[in-house]
Image: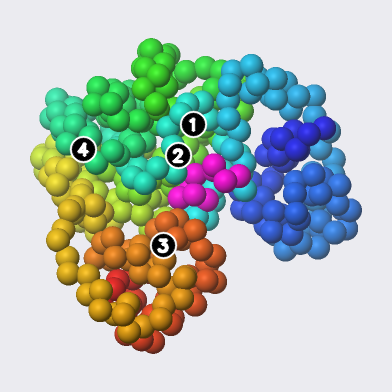
Amino acid sequence: MNDLLYKIAFTQVPLIGPVQAKILLEHFENVEDIFKAKKSSLEQIEGIGTIKASNIKGFADFASIEKELAFIEKNNIQPLFFTDDSYPKRLRNCYDPPTMLYYRGTADLNAAKIIAVIGTRSHTEYGRQLTEKLVKELAAQNVTIASGMAFGIDGVAHKAAVKNNLPTVGVLAHGLDIMYPPEHSALAKEMISNNGGLLTEFPSCTKPDKHNFPIRNRVVAGMSDATIVIETNVKGGSMITANLAYSYNRDVLAFPGRTTDNRSSGCIKLIKEKKASLITGADDVLEALGWKEVTKTRRPQRELFIDFSPEEKIILDVLGEKDATHIDELNFKSNLSSGAIAAAILNLELQNIVSTLPGKMYMVN
């Protein structure tokens, strides 16, 4: 049995979710070692215990995993395990990332700029126009658009991205053997042919059951730099995605809409609770994310007199891209370990070169 077979099997063990998977992967060099470990060794790991250890040792349905491997090979699907280099790094930094993802497409899931555009299934004409205008104005930024392939704003965002030659990734709440809603089958093909893709954590033969959609939403939020909410009710699925993005310390941006329109009530609630920043167009998005072209005096004299370490130079380069940078973005862009980042920032703070801001943000003085 090959390595991929064990990785897929690992995701099918009862009660071993993303959090438990991360714990186990910290204790073992590879997944095969987890299956071959003694039950007593597994039981002693904090967060695992007797029942989960028994489930691992008792897993025997490798025949269904073989079928999944055949499906992956036949349909040119790229499996992305949590530890793989091609796994979305932004998503990996979340506290509950999927252990395995299945991907069909060519869009770079670690592109420099990824934005989630989401909203209600029953959008207004105002919402459609906002979405199309926003995506068109973002085209110059080479942004990758992520959304959930649903009717409504999701579909409008994907179609606008294709129209403006932007890669767009649809995150699914089911396996890659079907398309839901089926009316988006043609759109899915267009997205893939336009350097986009389809992404899911669900294996083939997984139906679009109701409880899968909130699970899907965390992938949309976690893989993106920011989540933009166009229109949503206070109880809409988009509110789940927005709140997940907020919990991941990602930017949440929302169009205010009309106070009398129920389909904007969720956006207004997010803005009032300070979970989302109010935006009126692409220019506000660029400013909020620090992507706006700003002429800044970089004070190069410092480098003439201070001997920075390689790690400190990397940190300063990343911080110099915008006024303030979140720790997650530092992790993603620097490719340094958390310990190396912490040590570099501490040294730079002691030299009064970098300051720490609320919300795990950092800036160059």
* Image depth: mark 4 or mark 1 in front: 4
N-term-proximal mark, 1 vs 2 = 2
Identify the residue shown where x is 69% and y is 46%: 16
Residue neighbourhood size for the residue with mark 2, other residues' Cα within 10 Å, grouped as few (<14), some (14–19), many (≥20): many
N-term-proximal mark, 3 vs 1 = 1
Report if the CB atoms under discs 1 and 2 are less than 8 Å apart.
Answer: yes
Above or below 356: residue 162: above
* Image depth: mark 4 or mark 2 in front: 4
N-term-proximal mark, 4 vs 2 = 2
Which residue has dot 2 on it? 109
Q: Is 311 on the left-hand or right-hand side of 359?
A: right
* Image depth: mark 1 or mark 2 in front: 2
Report if the CB atoms under discs 3 and 2 are less than 8 Å apart.
Answer: no
Where does the image place residue 50, in percent across and percent down from the top left?
81, 54
Identify the residue shown where x is 58% and y is 21%: 76
Which residue has dot 1 on it? 199
Residue 202 placement: quadrant: top right
Residue 42 placement: quadrant: bottom right
Badge 3 amino acid: Leu
Residue neighbourhood size for the residue with mark 3, other residues' Cα within 10 Å, grouped as few (<14), some (14–19), many (≥20): many
Q: Is 11 on the left-hand or right-hand side of 292?
A: right
Q: What segment is highlighted magenta in the picture?
A: 84-92
SS at mark 3 in the image: helix
Which residue has dot 3 on it? 330
Q: CA distance from mark 3 to mark 2?
A: 17 Å
Where does the image place residue 293, in percent across and percent down from the top left?
17, 53
Badge 2 amino acid: Leu
Q: Is 257 on the left-hand or right-hand side of 156?
A: left
Badge 4 amino acid: Ala
Identify the residue shown where x is 47% and y is 70%: 311
